[in-house]
Amino acid sequence: MKSILNNLVLGLSLALVLPAWADTHHPSHAGAANHAAMLTEGVVKKVDKAQGKLTLKHGPLENLDMPGMTMVFRVQDASWLDRVKPGDTIRFLADRVDGVFTVTTLEVVNP
Ligand SMILES: [Cu+2]
């Protein structure tokens, strides 16, 4: 009976410790507020209004299973391109829309 209890306690503490461990090893989560846990931080490298595209240096995108890198995204709402400029830090959500990596949520971090 006692060993069952010990296993239970061990299992519980592992369940608590592992996510925390994973978190500290994710640069995108460092400093990111919990309320924005799903958003990834990125830095705007280029704004292409003609093409409706944004070049971002982004942190890991868990939902796309993508490590941090610099790449081009389409934006879901072209008006977002008026809100950002190269050098801006943003928080965003990206998804594959019709096979194209697309920013579906965008939050400008700097004023
Ligand atoms: Cu990428």
Image (cartoon, rainbow, N blue to C red):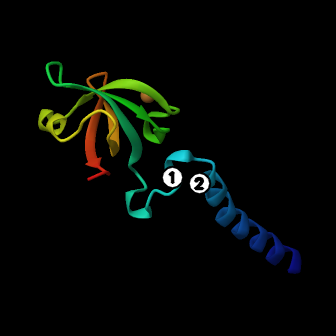
Residue placed furthest toward the top = 51
Above or below, 12 relative to 49: below
Camera-side residue of 50 and 36: 50
The numbered dot on residue 91 is none
Q: Which residue is mark 1?
A: 29
- The reply to whether dot 2 and dot 1 touch (C-beta < 8 Å) is yes
Indicate left or right for 87 with 76 as reference: right
At a point 48% along the width and 39% down the height, the residue shown is 59
Residue at the location (26% across, 53% down)? 111
Where's residue 22, x and y in %? 63, 51
Q: Amino acid at mark 2?
A: Asp
- The secondary structure type at the circle numbered 2 is helix
SS at badge 1: helix
Q: Position of residue 81 (x, y in %)?
A: 18, 34
104 left or right of 1 in image: left
For image coordinates 38% across by 63% down, the residue present is: 35
Give left or right: position of 84 versus 71. Answer: left
Q: Nearer the viewer, residue 39 or 97?
A: 39
The crowding category of the residue bearing disc 1, from other C-alpha atoms within 10 Å (few below 14, some 14 to 19, many at least 20), is many
Q: Amino acid at mark 1?
A: His
Residue 28, position as x, y percentages in the image: 50, 47
Q: Which residue is mark 2?
A: 23
